[in-house]
Image (cartoon, rainbow, N blue to C red):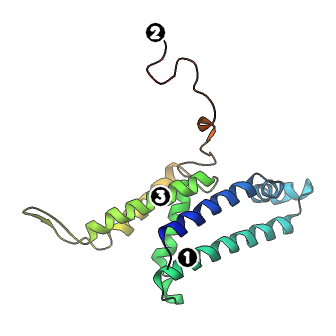
Amino acid sequence: MTTIWWVYGWLAVTIYLVWRIVRSPYGRAMLAVRENVIAAQATGVNVLGSRLIAFVASAFLTAIAGALWAHEVTSFSPAAFYFTQTFNIIIMLVVGGMGSITGSVVGTVLVTLLSELLRNAELGIHIGPLAIPPLYGLSQIVLAVVFVLVVTFRRKGLMGDREIRWTWLTRPPAPGHEEGGGTH
Protein backbone atom coordinates (compact mmCIF):
# COMPACT_ATOMS: atom_id res chain seq x y z
CA MET A 1 0.00 0.00 0.00
CA THR A 2 1.02 3.58 -0.57
CA THR A 3 2.08 5.22 2.68
CA ILE A 4 2.67 8.86 3.47
CA TRP A 5 6.42 8.17 3.51
CA TRP A 6 6.36 6.87 -0.06
CA VAL A 7 4.48 9.99 -1.11
CA TYR A 8 6.88 12.35 0.71
CA GLY A 9 9.85 10.45 -0.68
CA TRP A 10 8.62 10.76 -4.25
CA LEU A 11 7.70 14.39 -3.59
CA ALA A 12 11.31 15.11 -2.59
CA VAL A 13 12.64 13.21 -5.62
CA THR A 14 10.24 15.05 -7.94
CA ILE A 15 11.12 18.49 -6.60
CA TYR A 16 14.83 17.71 -6.85
CA LEU A 17 14.53 16.36 -10.42
CA VAL A 18 12.48 19.34 -11.60
CA TRP A 19 14.88 21.74 -9.88
CA ARG A 20 17.85 20.07 -11.61
CA ILE A 21 16.11 20.06 -15.00
CA VAL A 22 15.14 23.75 -14.78
CA ARG A 23 18.73 24.74 -13.98
CA SER A 24 20.29 22.57 -16.68
CA PRO A 25 20.94 23.64 -20.29
CA TYR A 26 17.97 21.49 -21.30
CA GLY A 27 15.75 23.35 -18.84
CA ARG A 28 16.92 26.72 -20.14
CA ALA A 29 16.11 25.53 -23.66
CA MET A 30 12.63 24.43 -22.51
CA LEU A 31 12.03 27.84 -20.92
CA ALA A 32 13.17 29.58 -24.11
CA VAL A 33 10.81 27.44 -26.21
CA ARG A 34 7.95 28.14 -23.78
CA GLU A 35 8.49 31.90 -23.97
CA ASN A 36 9.03 32.29 -27.72
CA VAL A 37 9.43 29.40 -30.14
CA ILE A 38 10.70 31.51 -33.03
CA ALA A 39 13.30 33.34 -30.93
CA ALA A 40 14.47 30.06 -29.37
CA GLN A 41 14.80 28.46 -32.79
CA ALA A 42 16.68 31.50 -34.09
CA THR A 43 19.24 31.17 -31.28
CA GLY A 44 19.89 27.53 -32.12
CA VAL A 45 17.63 25.76 -29.63
CA ASN A 46 16.35 22.38 -30.83
CA VAL A 47 12.62 22.98 -30.32
CA LEU A 48 11.53 19.41 -31.04
CA GLY A 49 14.21 17.97 -28.74
CA SER A 50 13.29 20.36 -25.92
CA ARG A 51 9.62 19.51 -26.22
CA LEU A 52 10.39 15.80 -26.35
CA ILE A 53 12.48 15.98 -23.15
CA ALA A 54 9.71 17.94 -21.42
CA PHE A 55 7.11 15.40 -22.55
CA VAL A 56 9.15 12.38 -21.40
CA ALA A 57 10.01 13.95 -18.01
CA SER A 58 6.40 14.92 -17.35
CA ALA A 59 5.15 11.50 -18.48
CA PHE A 60 7.59 9.79 -16.09
CA LEU A 61 6.56 11.93 -13.11
CA THR A 62 2.87 11.60 -13.97
CA ALA A 63 3.25 7.82 -14.15
CA ILE A 64 4.82 7.78 -10.67
CA ALA A 65 1.97 9.93 -9.31
CA GLY A 66 -0.60 7.69 -10.99
CA ALA A 67 1.02 4.55 -9.62
CA LEU A 68 1.04 5.96 -6.09
CA TRP A 69 -2.58 7.04 -6.40
CA ALA A 70 -3.73 3.73 -7.95
CA HIS A 71 -1.98 1.80 -5.20
CA GLU A 72 -3.75 3.96 -2.60
CA VAL A 73 -7.28 3.62 -3.99
CA THR A 74 -6.77 -0.03 -5.11
CA SER A 75 -9.54 0.25 -7.72
CA PHE A 76 -8.85 2.05 -10.93
CA SER A 77 -10.92 2.96 -13.98
CA PRO A 78 -11.22 5.84 -16.45
CA ALA A 79 -14.35 6.95 -14.59
CA ALA A 80 -12.14 7.83 -11.60
CA PHE A 81 -10.81 10.84 -13.52
CA TYR A 82 -13.79 13.10 -13.29
CA PHE A 83 -14.01 16.84 -13.96
CA THR A 84 -13.61 17.89 -10.31
CA GLN A 85 -10.24 16.21 -9.95
CA THR A 86 -8.92 17.75 -13.16
CA PHE A 87 -10.27 21.15 -12.13
CA ASN A 88 -8.55 20.91 -8.71
CA ILE A 89 -5.18 20.10 -10.32
CA ILE A 90 -5.47 23.08 -12.68
CA ILE A 91 -6.45 25.35 -9.78
CA MET A 92 -3.41 24.16 -7.79
CA LEU A 93 -1.08 25.17 -10.62
CA VAL A 94 -2.76 28.49 -11.40
CA VAL A 95 -3.09 29.62 -7.76
CA GLY A 96 0.55 28.91 -6.91
CA GLY A 97 1.97 30.01 -10.22
CA MET A 98 3.11 27.88 -13.13
CA GLY A 99 6.40 29.72 -13.48
CA SER A 100 8.07 28.29 -10.38
CA ILE A 101 8.56 25.05 -8.52
CA THR A 102 7.77 26.81 -5.25
CA GLY A 103 4.52 28.13 -6.72
CA SER A 104 3.41 24.63 -7.69
CA VAL A 105 4.06 23.36 -4.16
CA VAL A 106 2.42 26.39 -2.49
CA GLY A 107 -0.64 26.14 -4.75
CA THR A 108 -1.00 22.42 -4.06
CA VAL A 109 -0.77 22.89 -0.30
CA LEU A 110 -3.22 25.85 -0.23
CA VAL A 111 -5.84 24.24 -2.47
CA THR A 112 -5.61 20.91 -0.62
CA LEU A 113 -6.01 22.59 2.79
CA LEU A 114 -8.90 24.74 1.55
CA SER A 115 -10.63 21.71 0.00
CA GLU A 116 -10.30 19.68 3.19
CA LEU A 117 -11.59 22.53 5.37
CA LEU A 118 -14.56 23.07 3.07
CA ARG A 119 -15.31 19.35 2.90
CA ASN A 120 -16.26 19.46 6.58
CA ALA A 121 -18.62 22.39 5.91
CA GLU A 122 -20.25 20.40 3.10
CA LEU A 123 -21.16 17.68 5.58
CA GLY A 124 -22.79 20.14 7.95
CA ILE A 125 -21.46 21.64 11.16
CA HIS A 126 -22.79 20.99 14.66
CA ILE A 127 -21.43 23.30 17.36
CA GLY A 128 -23.44 22.83 20.54
CA PRO A 129 -27.05 23.85 19.84
CA LEU A 130 -26.05 25.53 16.57
CA ALA A 131 -26.44 23.32 13.50
CA ILE A 132 -25.54 24.47 10.01
CA PRO A 133 -27.10 22.25 7.35
CA PRO A 134 -24.93 20.52 4.76
CA LEU A 135 -23.72 22.87 2.01
CA TYR A 136 -23.15 20.49 -0.88
CA GLY A 137 -20.82 21.79 -3.58
CA LEU A 138 -19.42 24.60 -1.42
CA SER A 139 -15.80 23.56 -2.02
CA GLN A 140 -16.18 23.68 -5.80
CA ILE A 141 -17.85 27.10 -5.64
CA VAL A 142 -15.17 28.56 -3.37
CA LEU A 143 -12.36 27.06 -5.47
CA ALA A 144 -13.93 28.49 -8.63
CA VAL A 145 -14.13 31.94 -7.02
CA VAL A 146 -10.49 31.67 -5.87
CA PHE A 147 -9.50 30.63 -9.40
CA VAL A 148 -11.29 33.61 -10.96
CA LEU A 149 -9.80 36.03 -8.41
CA VAL A 150 -6.26 34.74 -8.97
CA VAL A 151 -6.61 34.82 -12.76
CA THR A 152 -8.06 38.35 -12.57
CA PHE A 153 -5.72 39.97 -10.06
CA ARG A 154 -2.56 37.80 -10.06
CA ARG A 155 -2.20 36.47 -13.59
CA LYS A 156 1.01 34.60 -12.81
CA GLY A 157 -0.32 33.11 -9.53
CA LEU A 158 0.73 33.85 -5.99
CA MET A 159 4.41 33.12 -6.57
CA GLY A 160 4.65 34.05 -10.26
CA ASP A 161 8.09 33.00 -11.45
CA ARG A 162 9.77 33.60 -8.07
CA GLU A 163 11.36 30.81 -6.07
CA ILE A 164 11.95 30.57 -2.36
CA ARG A 165 15.70 30.78 -1.85
CA TRP A 166 17.23 28.43 0.68
CA THR A 167 20.44 30.41 1.10
CA TRP A 168 19.28 31.61 4.51
CA LEU A 169 19.94 28.06 5.76
CA THR A 170 23.62 28.15 4.84
CA ARG A 171 24.75 31.74 5.42
CA PRO A 172 25.47 33.22 8.83
CA PRO A 173 23.08 35.88 10.16
CA ALA A 174 23.80 39.48 9.24
CA PRO A 175 25.53 41.62 11.88
CA GLY A 176 23.03 42.98 14.39
CA HIS A 177 20.57 40.17 13.69
CA GLU A 178 22.09 37.51 15.89
CA GLU A 179 19.87 35.52 18.15
CA GLY A 180 19.34 37.32 21.43
CA GLY A 181 18.26 40.75 20.25
CA GLY A 182 21.13 42.29 18.25
CA THR A 183 23.65 44.92 19.31
CA HIS A 184 23.55 46.85 22.58
How far apart are the two marked residues, 2 and 1, measured between alpha carbons?
A: 55 Å
Helix, strand or loop for disc 1: helix
Decide if residue 148 is in sight here: no
Circle 1/circle 3 CB separation < 8 Å = no
Q: Is residue 161 found left or right of 123 in the rendered image?
A: right
Few, some or many residues within 10 Å of mark 2 (<14, 14–19, 20+): few
Q: Is residue 64 found left or right of 45 in the rendered image?
A: left
Q: Position of residue 112 (x, y in %)?
A: 43, 63
Helix, strand or loop for disc 2: loop
Decide if residue 175 is in sight here: yes
The one nearer the camera, 130 or 3, is: 3
Instruction: Name above or below for residue 109 compared with residue 162.
Output: below
Helix, strand or loop for disc 3: helix
Q: Position of residue 51 (x, y in %)?
A: 79, 67
The one nearer the camera, 159 or 173, is: 173
First of labels 2, 1 by sequence position: 1
Q: Name the residue beneath numbered marker 1.
A: 68
Instruction: Name above or below for residue 64 compared with residue 75.
Output: above
Instruction: Name above or below for residue 184 compared with residue 148.
Output: above
Residue 66's quadrant in the figure? bottom right
- The amino acid on which the numbered mark 3 sits, given as a three-letter code, is Val
Foreground label between 1 and 3: 1
- The amino acid on which the numbered mark 2 sits, given as a three-letter code, is His
Few, some or many residues within 10 Å of mark 3 (<14, 14–19, 20+): some
Q: Position of residue 26 (x, y in %)?
A: 82, 58
Q: Which mark is residue 109?
A: 3
- The amino acid on which the numbered mark 1 sits, given as a three-letter code, is Leu
Q: Which mark is residue 184?
A: 2
